[in-house]
Structure formats: C-alpha cells, structure tokens
Image: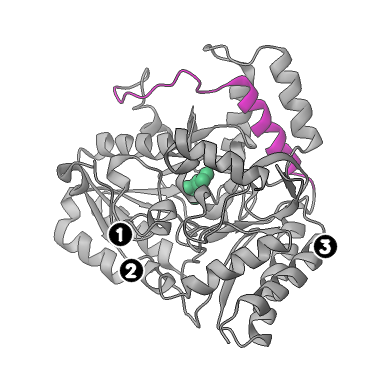
Amino acid sequence: MSRSAELFDRAKQLMPGGVSSPVRAFRAVGGTPFFVTRAAGCRLTDADGKSYVDYVCSWGPLILGHAHPAVLEAVRGAAERGWSYGAPCEGEVRLAEVVCRRMPSIEMVRFVSSGTEATMAAVRVARAATRRDLVLKFEGCYHGHADGFLVRAGSGVATLGLPDSPGVPRALAELTVTVPFNDAAAVEDVFRRRGAEIAAVIVEPYVGNAGFIAPEPGFHATLRSLCDAGGALLIFDEVMTGFRVAPGGAQARLGVRPDLTTLGKIIGGGMPVGAYGGRAELMRLVAPEGPVYQAGTLAGNPVAMAAGLATLLETERPGFYEALERRTARLVAGIGDAARRHGVPVTAGHAGSMWGAFFTGGPVRNFAEAKRADAGLFARWHRAALERGVYLAPSAFEAGFVSSAHTDADIDFTIAQLDAALAAARPR
Ligand code: HOZ
C-alpha cells in the first residue's frame, strides 16, 4: 500500500471523505488522492516521493508557483515579527494600496479570511444599500459555500452532482434566482419580472467553477446596463480571476466596472485571505463606519498580508502577464492538437493563465453545455495524466492555472504527457 493510500485510510476515519474540501477526495475521477509533502516551483511531491507538474496551484492563489523565494522571504520576515496581532498593521494598508491602485473600481476594501466570507459580506452590503433581498446568480457559478449561494452552484457541488445543499433553509434559497451564464435575455426577463426586488447580480466574470467558461462579447456590459437601469448592484466575484486574467483582473480585461468586487486567492499569495471592496459610498456602510456588520479575528493577518503583497509586487515585473498568457495559450493549443490527433472532440480555452478543456465539440457557453462533456473520458484522462506526472484539477468543473514557475520546458513536457494520457484514455 502506498503511503498516500495509508494516510487516506486514516484520514477517512477522522475527516468527512478524508479531506478538508470535497473536490480533493478525487470522487469525480476515481483513485486515491495523493498526499503532498513538499512543493516548489511548479512541482508537488507526494508522500511516496512521486513528483507532479501542478496545474491546480492551490486552486489559483499560486500565480508565482510554490514557495517562491520573494514570498518565502516576506512570510519569514512577517512571522518573525509575530504572526497574528488582532490589531491593525502596516501590511493591511500596503496591500490595500496595491489592490485599489490595480483595480480602480475598488475605492475602499475590507480584508477577510476567505472568498466565502468576501461574497457573503458583499451581498450583505448590496442588500443594505438597495434595501432589497433578491440576488441573481448564474448556474454553475460558485461564490463560496454560504447558504444563499448553494443554489445551482459549481465547484464541488457540481463535481459531486449535488442539486443544491440540504441544510440551506428554503426561505433563504428562494432569495437566489439563477439563470444560465451568457444568457442576457434570461437576465433581462428576471429584471422585467422582479427588477424592483433585485439587490445584486453576482457573477464570476470568467467562470472557473464549472470548468473554464468565457463570457460572450458584450455579456457583462449588458449586465452593467441592466443593473443600472434596475437600480441593482453588479458584483464581480474575482476570487479566481482577480490579478489572474490581467493585471487589473477580469474587470480590466473586459472593460466593465462593477460596483463591488470580491477577491481571494492571489491577494493572499497562498495564505487564507479574502477581500471585498468597491465604491467608497457602499463600503462606508460597513461597520464601524456604517451599520452593516462583518468582522474577523484573523482578518488582515500580517503573514497573509505580507504573502499577498509580495505576490502582487512580483506580478508587476515587466512582461509578467504576457509571458504567462503565452505559455497558457501554448498549453491549451497543445491539448487541442492532441485531441484532434486522437479524434476526441474538445473545447478548450483560456484567459490569461486561467484555462480549461471540455471533452465536447462545444460551444460551451454555460453550465448545461459544460455538463455535456464526456465525464468518463475526463476521469480516465486525469488518472492517466497523474500516472505520467501531471496534476490536473480532479474535476471537470474546475479551471486550471499556469504559474510563472512553469517554464516552456514544463509546458512541452506537459503537452507530451497529456497527449499520451489521451491516447490511453480515449474510447476505442
Ligand atoms: N472550491 C475551491 C475551488 N474552486 C476549492 C477546492 C479545494 O480546495 O478543494
């Protein structure tokens, strides 16, 4: 028995599914999850000494790869000065300055400890500002695991094929209206029927939790106009896309200014961090300046702030995003070429260094179309890739990520292994 298998057996006795977050249990792809003992650059090493080129990158935060020297130094330095104060620290101010500079729609920001907290709080602010209760979200989009968001959600909910979650009171779920992503007419229809009740439209501007799905041209501009006309707020959930798909996130790439933005992942450089921010007049509703309550013992943690700041500053090196995008484009093209060679239909795409591939002829514009992809083939491909030293997200409903630690040689290696994995996995 491998060391990972042995650890997984022990974990299953003690932790639901043996994991701390559902997708990690490998239920959608089969096999036993590997347990990580070390990570450096673009590689993970498991408890049995096997190494993998990592395209999960801690589910997005590690845009510089694992244990980047600049982040390591910042974390060490911060930890030496004490790792939790429960009091304001300079790191919060410095990170806030960078976030607001790079995302000008964020005039004020509040740091929290996870993306889930960020989206919960942003919706609370939107409800308080509009004095309305309804939230419009998109099928397959995932905004963390707060009650009101577990309605036709993506990520682990989609991976496990759960319709919605038990434990969410019906009265709360009824405050969430869902429509298909990229369907402007459906959004218009909801505004026509219930516009006066809608507090906010929340969207992953590029969907990453139903696999990777790009918006159609003009979709977000339409959301912006509908929100403006209907008196609702537009919330961009940029937990995944923020500082990932462009230096200023999806809002810069798409040229659409949301009222509120939620962040996480990259702004913590791999430490537990989230944030929400937006127009000052909205953020001034947050306690203690205003009456909307939200708080956190570890919010603004000095080590997390230092890791996030070091990460963001590294991404400001000239050509950083261009190089990442070029490598990601090559990876995605390589997967497309391999699929064509093996006669497998594929729809693959990327924005910056966030990418995905569905085994279907496409187009994939929404969650329903994503679900048409061949899940069995994906599972076999995942297992075959893992055997060949490439770690893809263990779910067809999660995006992949390339980091600056992935070299051209790593991409070449990956394309060759994914090609061989597809040859082994394809139906005959
Ligand atoms: N749901 C997150 C990714 N979309 C996190 C998954 C995990 O950490 O297992």
- Judging by the rendered image, the residue that carries numbered circle 3 is 408
User: Is 54 situated left or right of 318 in this image?
Assistant: left
Note whether residue 239 is visible.
no
Callout 3: SS: helix
264 or 27: nearer the viewer: 27
Scheme of colours in the image: one colour
Q: Residues within 10 Å of mark 1 (few under 14, many from 20)?
A: many
- Judging by the rendered image, the residue that carries numbered circle 1 is 226
| Rendering coords of residue 321 (x, y %) | 72, 54
The magenta span reads 291-317
Q: Are marks 1 and 2 in contact (CB under 8 Å)?
A: yes
Residue 184, label in figure: 2
User: In this rendering, is residue 51 above or below 70?
Assistant: below
**Residue type (three-letter) at the residue carrying disc 3:** Asp
Task: Quadrant for the C terminus, please.
Answer: bottom right
Numbered disc total: 3
From the viewer's perspective, is the residue at label 1 or at label 2 nearer? 2
